[in-house]
Amino acid sequence: MMSIATQNVVQLAFGFFVNFVAFNTQGMIEESVVESVSLDGSITKYAGYYSLAIIYAFYTLGNLTAAQIVDTLTPKWAMCIGALCYASFQVGFLFLNSTYLYISSAILGFGSSILWTGQGSYLSQNCTKETTSRMAALLWGMHECCLIGGGILIFIVFSVTDSYDVIPKFTIKLLYSMFTILAILSAFVFSMLREPVYKKEKSGCYKKLMTSTFRLLFTRKMLFLIVIFSYVGIEQSFWTGIYPTCVSFTRKLGYNGNALVALNLICTGIGQVSAGIIFGFLGDKVRKLGRDYLILFATFIHLLAYVIIGLNFPASASLTKNDDSGLFWTPNLYVALAIGIVLGFADACWNTQIMSFLCETYPEKSAQAFAIFKFFESLLSCFTFIFSSLISLYWVLTILSIFSILALICFFIVERERVDLENAEENAMENRK
């Protein structure tokens, strides 16, 4: 029979699936929607980019206070409020205008910070050292099913309907009504969460929590982790934004770029979910083998993917529509989709092991640790979106490769230190006996 802790994590994962099957799907079509609505002059066609910048800015800033808010509200209610912030953003597309879009983008960015920090805190309060790897993989695998569901929906929208260039207003209202309902439903799912099994007492003092967060930030271990968080932010912006753009802009893959992006999203989801399933079944074995070896594997396949992307896509693929070839061959759709699976799998490796490491290493400061994680992840994602619009794809791949190796080295250091400390504590306990 499923334990209470596992039931809690499954319900948490379901709430995230419901929320992000809506949000990730709308993210795929937001630019097309804004461009379609802009034809009547009611909004600038660049509003989608401004919205994204505002979301990342407020998400990054929100992470500075997210730990304190989550501690005050409890993870359950923080996630509930965060989901409602997503709903407030979605509903704005039913009457799209610049003012509401920008205000709701700020609300969404802030809500996202407490939603993700709340997730990390709630997860850690339902885990032990023995179950962190399995629980993190279970949560990640179920949550990332949203990529597959969203990709299928978008593929249908752009392949079956006549919404290739311009999305009709009726279709926009229908989709965003559904997205809003799903976001509200996810808030309801979060509101029904049980108390965590290993509940942490509230700190109660805002100043104390802020001080604790900043003290944790400047510890030796956290400084190594910041390099890891930064890489995850860079590679996340790559697979969520830059690589799909390459697929869409490379005409030799096919002219229905939106449908191809949807197929890539499905493939990325398959990679994410596959990793979640594998690590879920092998949770205890992964811990015994060592997280560092799993991260070594993730780094290897990431580097392999970056090389193949360079061979399969031209340097201008991330910047403009093109009919060029890659370094060694003509862009191949099957290779591009296979890379989507690899990017999803490797990203899941990094995220599940980071979540597991933070839950196990900082059980009493999980909210602070996850807030720092999300702060640097979002900050580097924002920087990556900015510099990727100024440099070619090959330079982006070079930066990714360098950071992946640095992150691997840092992960080996902190994981080996954790293992050594754990062994020392076990030996000390045996000596007392």
Image (cartoon, rainbow, N blue to C red):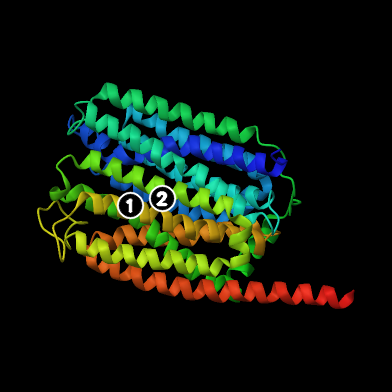
Residue 395 in the figure: left or right of residue 10: left
Earlier residue among tags 2 and 1: 2
Nearer the observer, 191 or 101: 191
Q: Residues within 10 Å of mark 2 (few under 14, many from 20)?
A: many
Where residue 161 sits in the image (x, y, percent)? 22, 26
Picture residue at 54% right of the left edge, 60% below the top: 353
The answer to whether one can see residue 48 in this image is yes
Tell me how many marks there are.
2
Picture residue at 22% right of the left edge, 37% below the top: 35
Classify 302 as above or below 321: below
Disc 1 residue type? Gly
Q: Which quarter of the picture shows residue 195? A: top right
Quadrant for the N terminus in the image: top right
Classify 142 as above or below 174: below
Where residue 199 sits in the image (x, y, percent)? 74, 48
Cβ atoms under marks 2 and 1 closer than 8 Å:
yes
Task: Using the image, tell me which numbered label, if any, was put on residue 271.
Answer: 2
Which residue sits furthest left? 323
Picture residue at 22% right of the left edge, 56% below the top: 318
Classify 270 as above or below 209: above
Picture residue at 53% right of the left edge, 33% below the top: 186
Quadrant for the C terminus in the image: bottom right
Disc 2 residue type? Gly
The answer to whether one can see residue 367 in this image is no
Q: Residues within 10 Å of mark 1 (few under 14, many from 20)?
A: many
Task: Using the image, tell me which numbered label, if any, was put on residue 340.
Answer: 1
Label 1: state its secondary structure: helix
Where residue 36 sits in the image (x, y, percent)? 21, 33
Residue 430 in the figure: left or right of residue 370: right
Q: Which quarter of the picture shows residue 193? A: top right
Task: Using the image, tell me which numbered label, if any, was put on residue 236.
Answer: none
